[in-house]
Image (tube, grey):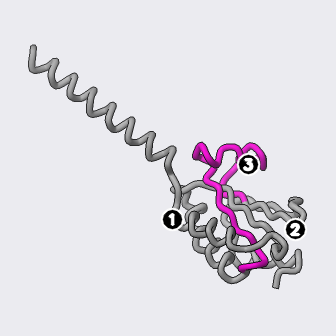
């Protein structure tokens, strides 16, 4: 009987550790690629920016993860013309942007003109060639 109680307490303790570590990982969830993209966009001045490309998604979401290399390519190829920003809307940091942009599904791409007005929105994976056409609508070359 005494051994049974020890095993029960040990099992509860292990479950608590797993829950605590799992919730910590959930709230600290960021992507290295997204941090690199944010650093790239911060290096440009706002006077040159024609389009702000917001990717609202989450790490671990398959189509969201498929967008990461495309965002990186856009940030590099159109540096100085396009500001690329990724918000993980499943984190405490990204939650306000989910509300601000009324996100109902992920990934969602929101495109803002140089004045900060939304001119295009897309839900789901967005192929690079189609995405570039949206950038070109605002004079990005």
Residue that numbered label 3 is attached to: 103
Q: CA distance from mark 2 to mark 3?
A: 22 Å
Q: Which residues are magenta?
A: 79-108
Q: Is residue 46 left or right of residue 79?
A: right
Q: Quadrant of residue 140?
A: bottom right
Residue at 58% across, 64% down = 34
Residue at 88% across, 80% down = 139
Earlier residue among tags 2 and 3: 3
Per the image, label 1 sits on a secondary structure element best described as: helix
Residue that numbered label 1 is attached to: 32
Residue 16 rendering spot, x and y as whole percentages: 33, 31
Q: CA distance from mark 2 to mark 1?
A: 27 Å
Q: Quadrant of the N terminus?
A: top left
Residue that numbered label 2 is attached to: 114
Earlier residue among tags 3 and 1: 1
Q: Which mark is residue 6?
A: none
Residue 38 rendering spot, x and y as whole percentages: 63, 65
Residue 22 rendering spot, x and y as whole percentages: 41, 42
């Amino acid at each position: 009987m005494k051994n049974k109680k020890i095993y029960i307490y040990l099992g509860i303790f292990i479950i608590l550790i797993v829950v605590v570590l799992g919730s910590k990982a959930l709230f600290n969830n960021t992507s290295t690629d997204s941090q690199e993209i944010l650093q790239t966009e911060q290096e440009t001045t706002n006077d040159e920016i024609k389009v702000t490309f917001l990717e609202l998604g989450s790490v671990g979401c398959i189509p969201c993860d498929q967008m990461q290399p495309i965002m990186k390519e856009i940030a590099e190829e159109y540096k100085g013309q396009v500001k690329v920003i990724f918000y993980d809307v499943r984190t405490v940091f990204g939650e306000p942007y989910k509300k601000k942009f009324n996100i109902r599904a992920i990934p969602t791409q929101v495109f803002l003109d140089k004045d900060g007005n939304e001119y295009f929105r897309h839900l789901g994976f967005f192929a690079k060639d189609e995405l570039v056409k949206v950038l070109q609508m605002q004079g990005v070359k």
